[in-house]
Image (tube, rainbow, N blue to C red):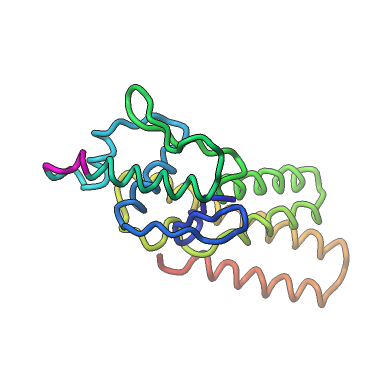
Amino acid sequence: MTFHVLGTLEIRDRDGTTVALPRQKQRVLLAYLLVHAGRVVSSDEIEYALWVERPPASARTNLYSYMSGLRAVLDRATATGQPRPRLVSRGYRLDVSPQECDADVFEQLVAGGRTALAAGDWAVAAGQLARGLALWRGDVLAGLEPYEWSLAYTTRLEQARLAAIEDWVEAWSMLSLFRHDGVAALGIRLEARMLLSFAERPG
């Protein structure tokens, strides 16, 4: 995975090493592009997002600088040979493959876990859900100032995490019931309480 949003926003190279974005506005720019991944966003939209509807006179020049710096970082991290974000006729577009972002991988694992849960395959369901939940390192886009444009994105993922925890508890509960293993069930309940406590803590 290259893009990590389930916690502090990070870019990681193919070896898993974190690649630093030196400027805060570049981090906000990356977050905005990830929230709108696969869609074209205009320079005006990005400027209003970065400067909260009050872009300075130098906003366009600064944006070009931030975008150039972000491309250089992504080029070092992914080495695809293609510039990202792409400049298109109406603005910029960041394409992200399903395996490149931890949020997408999380949702894939949760979907697989729910399919297994519906089929009564409790062990597979618990394993898939646990793998998805293990990707979380904190709140979505932690460390960035909350922006209105990111609210729907962060809320959707946080709600998906809570639902995944509930499904994980159900899968493990059913698994322990059929195994009749009192010790294992006790451990499951304790781990479930820890997960729920983490999920319900103040943001």
- Spot the residue most to the top: 89
Residue drawn at x 31%, y 57% is: 24
**Front one among 161 and 9:** 9
Q: Is residue 59 above or below residue 158?
A: above
Would you say the magenta stretch is mainly helix, strand or loop? helix
Image location of residue 160, percent across then percent down: 54, 50
Q: Is residue 58 magenta?
A: yes
Image location of residue 92, percent across then percent down: 37, 32
- Residue range of the region highlighted in magenta in the rendering: 57-61
Quadrant in which the C terminus appears: bottom left
Q: Is residue 132 above or below residue 60?
A: below
Residue drawn at x 70%, y 46% is: 114
**Front one among 166 and 149:** 149
**Front one among 59 and 144:** 59
- Spot the residue most to the left: 57
**Front one among 171 and 78:** 78
Give the quadrant of residue 194. Answer: bottom right
Give the quadrant of residue 53. Answer: top left
Q: Is residue 111 magenta?
A: no
Drawn side of residue 35 relative to residue 61, left or right: right
Residue drawn at x 43%, y 50% is: 154
Residue drawn at x 82%, y 49% is: 121
Image location of residue 16, percent across then percent down: 60, 59
Drawn side of residue 79 relative to residue 20, left or right: right
Image location of residue 89, percent across then percent down: 34, 22
Q: Is residue 92 above or below residue 177?
A: above
Q: How many marks?
A: 0
Give the quadrant of residue 23. Answer: bottom left
